[in-house]
Image (cartoon, rainbow, N blue to C red):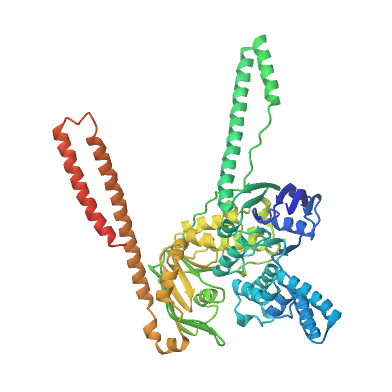
Amino acid sequence: MILSCNNISKSFDGKNILDECSFHIENHEKAAIVGINGAGKSTFFKIITGELPSDSGNVTISKDKSLAYLSQHPDVTMHNTIYEEMLTVKKDIIEEEQKIRALENEIKNLQGAELEAKLEQYSTLTHHFEINNGYAYKSEITGVLKGLGFDEGDFDKKIETLSGGQKTRVFLSKILISNPDIILLDEPTNHLDLNSIAWLEVFLSNYKGSVIVISHDRYFLDKIVTKVIEIDNCHCRTYAGNYSDYAYKKEQLRDAMLKQYYNYEREVKHQEQVIEKLKSFNREKSIKRAESREKQLSKMAIVEKPVFTDDKMRLRLTPDTVSGNDVLTVKNLGKSFDTNKLFEDLSFEIKRGEKVSIIGNNGTGKTTILKIINQIIPSDNGEIKLGSNVTIGYYDQEHNVLHMDKTIFDEISDDYPDMTNTKIRNVLAAFLFTGDDVYKYIRDLSGGERGRVSLAKLMLSNANFLILDEPTNHLDIISKEILENAINSYEGTILYVSHDRYFINKTATRILDLVNKKLVNYIGNYDYYLEKKDELTKIYAAKTDISVEDNNISDNKLSWQAQKEEQAKLRKKQNEQKKIEDKINELESKISRLSEEMNNPEISSNVSKLTELSKEIDKSNEELADLYEKWEEFI
């Protein structure tokens, strides 16, 4: 055991956050802490690191074990370049390397006993240097930075010029190359693109130390953790396995607790009815029996109704106006910032009712596309055309649509004065704002809470075309599920950018992958994208030599229409193949059933029936042979 938390309690302003929470972490174990926003996950991390004191309980870390913590607001040296900041982690190794170089120069001019002493010192230093991966520290730094989405051209950038997300990635890189015995990561995937998340999954899975992670990325948790610690209503419960295992076991536990409560309620009601009946007889014996039963009832252990965060809410919203079938048409879109060409000649269409996700690495221009469509920034070239009766609702990551000096309730009621108080409360409840929560000021909300208010306003708008930029950022898992349900039931059209693979898989009917300055179209969800990614990227967005690309741009580029037609043909082919496979299974089952019928002793002497069955089997075998021939054409 490398870390132990025993009976940790913490309250703020008289409100309990953690109540006698306990868990332990083994050497090399990968664990997750989950719970709704505000449950106390980050508070627990701060107690473990000593940043916050607990009210009671204790944290024990094994002797001589190191710990590193990635918070949601990391601190880095602003005036350093990215690479210089990485070198600060390897300060001891660099100093050791300098000593080794100095010794090498000294040894050249020494003899005898002095030489022997220096050689021994040199041997000790080089051995320690090798053990600490000194010969490979530069490649280690480069590998981690590239894995987390930095190009070598970024290494000389000053940290003070970076975005908040880039600074977080720098700090995460520092933690990973410092190789601590325990790593605490608070939302490490928030500012990573899909490739970087996949890289981090592999890195952490193979990491020799212990890892505790707070994350709402369900794919990520499924990939790396073997233990889940849930904080629910101030208490902790530990589940073995990954996130999917936890979700299944939690549902089982929920059902068992509800069953226990309903059984208790049923038994209490039954005993009360018996007692009432016995008393109604108004005889001494029956009254004594009633009193005896009342004593037994009073001694029964009370089973309180279990309290669960309501993750079963549904919000169904319908736009006031139905748009035309053609919602958005983009032709030959291009955008550059100074000498950085993000993309060129992008073309795509969106039809009514589609849920389209734009994915791609950070910095490829996904958010830029959304801003151009919303006329927040201009394009360099190209055409954007909205269809008839299309009204846009836009969700940005900065929540610029919110007023900091308003309460949540006023934020909704001021924009929708015709809504009744009850309807406003029902809508806010669907986004987990209940009771007095609705009177909190926007300025006092967390990023995730502001996100939920922005989403509530957006889903209440009259818009029939929603454009969402990273809508799941900072949302807890329950909030994500509410948003997934709202999107799936939404009768309008949605275009969104997201790096949340689970969310994309649940909601997208089509994916546009922005890769190598081109868009590759996938008619399906994230699982389909993963299946076809390598194949379709080679066809539609293969990397080419720049000079060749400039000279042969018309030869190398397949039009959007061609992509769409090819994808439609592919999906049609897959559907036809599936139908044939289903028919094959159906016929094979039928032949098996008919054969069993022929072997039935009751009809073995019935020549007429046997002949009929035999003909039916022959006919089915002929159909089966034809189907297998057709099926082979798809292979």
Up/down of 200 relative to 32, above or below = below
Q: Position of residue 145 (x, y in %)?
A: 63, 74
Residue 499 located left or right of residue 330? right
- Looking at the rendered structure, the number of numbered marks drawn on it comes to 0
- Outermost residue on the right side: it is 113
Q: Quadrant of the C terminus?
A: bottom left
Q: Residue 445: name its quadrant.
A: bottom right
- Given residues 4 and 574, the one toward you in this image is 4
- Given residues 68 and 435, the one toward you in this image is 68
Q: Residue at x 64, y 12 (%)?
A: 286
The answer to whether residue 416 of the structure is visible from this angle is: no
- Given residues 281 and 446, the one toward you in this image is 446
- Given residues 513 and 122, the one toward you in this image is 122
Q: Position of residue 218 (x, y in %)?
A: 57, 57
Q: Position of residue 578 (x, y in %)?
A: 33, 56
Q: Residue 337: name its quadrant.
A: bottom right
Residue 103 located left or right of residue 415? right
- Outermost residue on the front side: it is 112
Q: Residue at x 60, y 27 (%)?
A: 267
Up/down of 498 relative to 584, above or below = below
Residue 599 located left or right of residue 554? left
Q: Position of residue 453 (x, y in %)?
A: 61, 61
- Outermost residue on the top side: it is 284
The answer to whether residue 214 of the structure is visible from this angle is: yes
